[in-house]
Image (cartoon, rainbow, N blue to C red):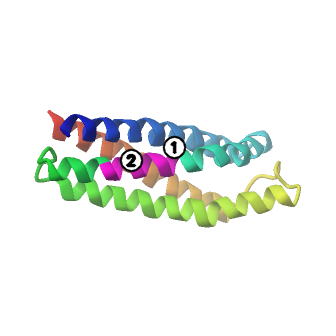
Amino acid sequence: MEFLSILITIIGFILGLGAVTVIDLHGFMARKSSYWTRATIQTHKITKPLIWAGITLIFVGHILLKKSGVLDENAIFHFLIIGVLILNGYFLSFVVSPALLTQEKEGRSEEILPKSLQSKITVSFIFSVLGWWGLVFLFVKSLV
């Protein structure tokens, strides 16, 4: 059971962190480029479900690891970070994504995003990078 729990968690990291890296880099490049704005709008349609699949697998894997006693006394921090990542994903999925899709639908895919939305995305980016990599660090720390 331990092996399966670790495997589920690692698969979640591969899916989620890979997709997050791709979309975060796209979003960073899109701040000043109409080409990258359009690419970000297209790419997020693929990365969004992969990120949700990744975080779901990580959550399930962590529950199983907690039950089997693999996670140490810092498990609360793991689940706290997962919660922050879920809230961040909620914001991106239900605030940013609809704005991107509306922009695309209106034929404005190549317009750079408004500064107000860019600022919110930047804060989300910081939570994303710190959260995902912090969770990887805590996970590896728990295994060794």
Could you tell me if residue 52 is visible in this image? yes
Alpha carbon separation for disc pair 1 and 2: 15 Å
Which residue is most to the right? 107
Task: Identify the magenta region.
Answer: 51-60
Which image quadrant for residue 143? Answer: top left
Name the N-terminal-most of marks 1 and 2. Answer: 1
Residue at 49% across, 52% down: 52
Label 2 neighbourhood size at 10 Å, few (<14), some (14-19), many (20+)? many
Residue corresponding to mark 2: 57
Residue at 73% across, 45% down: 42
**Residue 92 x, y percent position in the rendering:** 57, 59
Which image quadrant for residue 33? Answer: top right
SS for callout 1: helix
SS for callout 2: helix
The vertical placement of 79 against 21, above or below, is below
Question: Looking at the picture, which amino acid does disc 2 mark?
Answer: Leu
